[in-house]
């Protein structure tokens, strides 16, 4: 008798479960996108770097935030943008964000960024999102990035040498425990970028890797 292969949950179901069961912590919150979106020694350097970039464009850029989560980060970038479009795959999270954050140039949409058509903007932000997705989903997302001029990508990576882009099932975990991380310039993604530069790098304690934010001009 053949062993029945267990199919992975669809990404929407997996991400909804993460928030419902507080698998990223924050049980005192209604929704919580993890320590990486709340601990100041991680969030402040990131916000300083991205805010500096947005200010260098005189706050004139429209931004599409793919995987906005609980919006603790996005709310602090709003004032430096012309238009801010925040997207997440979890319907209840988006409905909560719509109620909690109301600004004239802010809008929220519930979309699957690997399948749905995405809004047009000058700059796309992907902050610690791809690291939770399968290679197939990342490949689909890369195809949509061509419409954006700038990509601000943040990924949690191993420190030192690692094998890039080992495949995973979408969900709570990332590639770090496999000594891997997402590198969009490497196979099978092979992102074509005109320029790239690191905006910010945070080395974590206890050999927990580093969080790297890179600006790509596409």
Image (cartoon, rainbow, N blue to C red):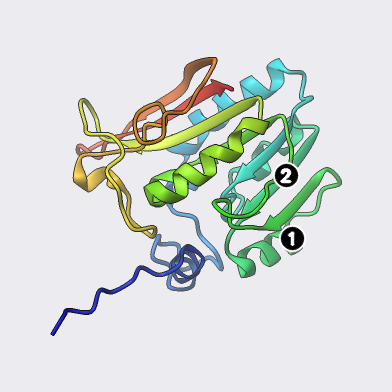
Q: How many marks?
A: 2
Tell me, yes or no, if residue 38 can be seen here: no
Q: Is residue 22 left or right of residue 142?
A: left
Q: Give neighbour class at mark 2: few <14, some 14-19, many 20+ (Cα, 10 Å).
A: some
Disc assigned to residue 60 = none
Q: Nearer the viewer, mark 1 or mark 2?
A: 2
Name the residue rendered at 20%, 26% in the picture.
161
Viewport quadrant of the C terminus: top right
Task: Indicate the position of residue 24 as horizontal and vertical percent values.
Answer: 40, 60
Task: Indicate the position of residue 53 as horizontal and vertical percent values.
Answer: 63, 20
CA separation in Å, label 1 and label 2: 17 Å
Q: Given contact means CB atoms under 8 Å apart, are the residues at marks 1 and 2 in contact? A: no
Q: Earlier in the sequence, mark 1 or mark 2?
A: 1
Disc assigned to residue 98 = 1
Q: Is residue 167 left or right of residue 9?
A: left
Residue 209 quadrant: top left
Task: Write down the residue under mark 2.
Answer: 119
Task: Classify 156 as above or below 213.
Answer: below
């Amino acid at each position: 008798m053949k062993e029945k292969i267990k199919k992975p949950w669809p990404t929407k179901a997996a991400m909804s479960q993460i928030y419902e069961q507080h698998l990223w912590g924050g049980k005192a919150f209604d929704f919580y996108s993890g320590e990486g979106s709340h601990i100041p020694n991680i969030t402040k350097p990131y916000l300083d770097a991205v805010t500096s970039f947005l200010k260098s464009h005189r706050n004139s850029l429209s931004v599409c935030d793919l995987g906005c989560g609980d919006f603790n980060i996005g709310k602090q970038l709003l004032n430096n943008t012309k238009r801010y479009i925040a997207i997440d795959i979890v319907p209840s999270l988006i409905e909560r964000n719509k109620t909690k954050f109301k600004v004239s140039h802010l809008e929220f949409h519930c979309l699957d960024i690997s399948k749905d058509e995405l809004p047009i903007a000058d700059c796309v932000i992907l902050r610690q999102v791809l690291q939770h997705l399968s290679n197939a989903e990342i490949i689909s997302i890369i195809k949509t990035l061509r419409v954006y001029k700038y990509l601000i990508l943040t990924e949690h990576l191993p420190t030192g040498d690692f094998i890039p882009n080992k495949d995973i099932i979408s969900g709570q975990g990332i590639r770090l425990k496999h000594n891997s991380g997402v590198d969009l310039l490497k196979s099978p993604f092979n992102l074509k970028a005109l320029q790239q530069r690191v905006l910010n790098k945070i080395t974590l304690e206890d050999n927990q890797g580093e969080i790297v934010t890179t600006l790509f001009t596409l």
